[in-house]
Amino acid sequence: STWGEVIMETMCAKTHDTCPLHGVHLDYQLAAAARKTPTDPIVTLLRDPVERTLSEFFFIRSPEGSITPFMDQWDFQNLTFLRLVRDEADDDKALDSFLHAWPEQPSFNRQVLYLAGFKRWGAALPFRWTGGEPQQREFLSVAKQHLDDVQAFGFTDCFVTSAAAMARVLGWDGAKVTQMAASTHRRAQRKAAAAAGLWRYRGKALALKAAGDHEFGGVWRSFVDSRAIEEIERLNWADVELHRFARRQF
């Protein structure tokens, strides 16, 4: 990501801060264990759950996604499910599978899952949402506590503003961080091209050919209809609540 792979790498080198494992996705337990001292800051970015879910789906189906989802940091232990989503030629069928083929999959409510913490340092821990809503409520409660404990957090949905706010907390050069946040787009996805194969799930994306990549370029939810958005929010209800909670705290 732009924050982890560009901004943190640049600013940590400049300030001689210790920023371990900034290029991968860490759950809260791994991030806490990676600190050299208990007072080292933990920062995190949250994302609108619909945007995050669709981004992950289309990433899995991208050329890069044919490799990286198999890494431990994603915690996908069900290779049958991954191949079902990745290799299906029909984008609508693939999205159906992503949303409904594996109800226990770790992509659902992933932000609650990672902010609550579910791994042990040095060992992959396969995770399933096997406890239903009570388990998710428990994780949501812990995630909210951890969000209160982190030194800084922001939102990819308002990335430049968030990066500037986090820089102030970390004592980094705000102007430099803002410039990098505004001008660098590491791992940016071409949304119109990625969503062009959707038909049943399409919403405003019926105008894909006329709009090109720019008109709808920043928002995944512009490419699916309201029923798809409602279904994604239903399946990720805990992430929706965490995102609302975080916005009230920001």
Image (cartoon, helix red, strand yellow):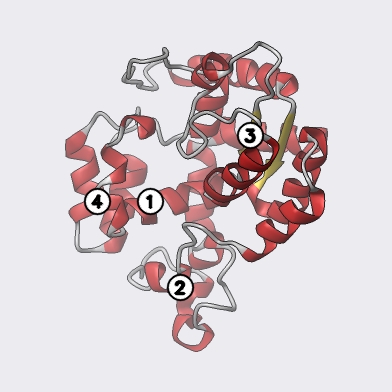
Residue 126 versus residue 62 in the image, above or below:
above
Residue type for callout 1: Phe
- Outermost residue toward the bottom in this view: 210
Residue sitting at 32 percent across and 51 percent down? Answer: 60
Residue sitting at 74 percent across and 47 percent down? Answer: 162
Give the image location of residue 86, x and y in percent: 24, 52
Residue hosting label 2: 192
Give the image location of residue 171, x and y in percent: 80, 36
Taking the image as shown, residue 159 lies to the left or right of residue 28, namely right
Residue 142 in view = yes
Q: Estimate the spatial distance between the alpha carbons at disc 1 and disc 4, rounded to whole Å.
A: 12 Å
Query: Local crowd at mark 2 within 10 Å, few (<14), some, or many (≥20)?
Result: many
Q: Estimate the spatial distance between the alpha carbons at disc 4 and disc 2, rounded to whole Å.
A: 20 Å
Q: Nearer the viewer, mark 2 or mark 3?
A: 3
Residue type for callout 2: Ala
Give the image location of residue 69, x and y in percent: 31, 41
The mark total stands at: 4
Q: Nearer the viewer, mark 1 or mark 4?
A: 4
Query: Local crowd at mark 3 within 10 Å, few (<14), some, or many (≥20)?
Result: some
Give the image location of residue 3, x and y in percent: 60, 46
Residue hosting label 3: 44
**Viewer-closest of 105 and 160:** 160
| Badge 1 element | helix
Residue type for callout 3: Thr
Q: Estimate the spatial distance between the alpha carbons at disc 3 and disc 4, rounded to whole Å.
A: 26 Å
Residue hosting label 4: 66
Query: Local crowd at mark 4 within 10 Å, few (<14), some, or many (≥20)?
Result: some
Kindly identify which numbered label has been placed on residue 57. 1
**Mark 3–mark 4 CB contact (< 8 Å):** no
Query: Local crowd at mark 1 within 10 Å, few (<14), some, or many (≥20)?
Result: some
Residue sitting at 46 percent across and 80 percent down? Answer: 208
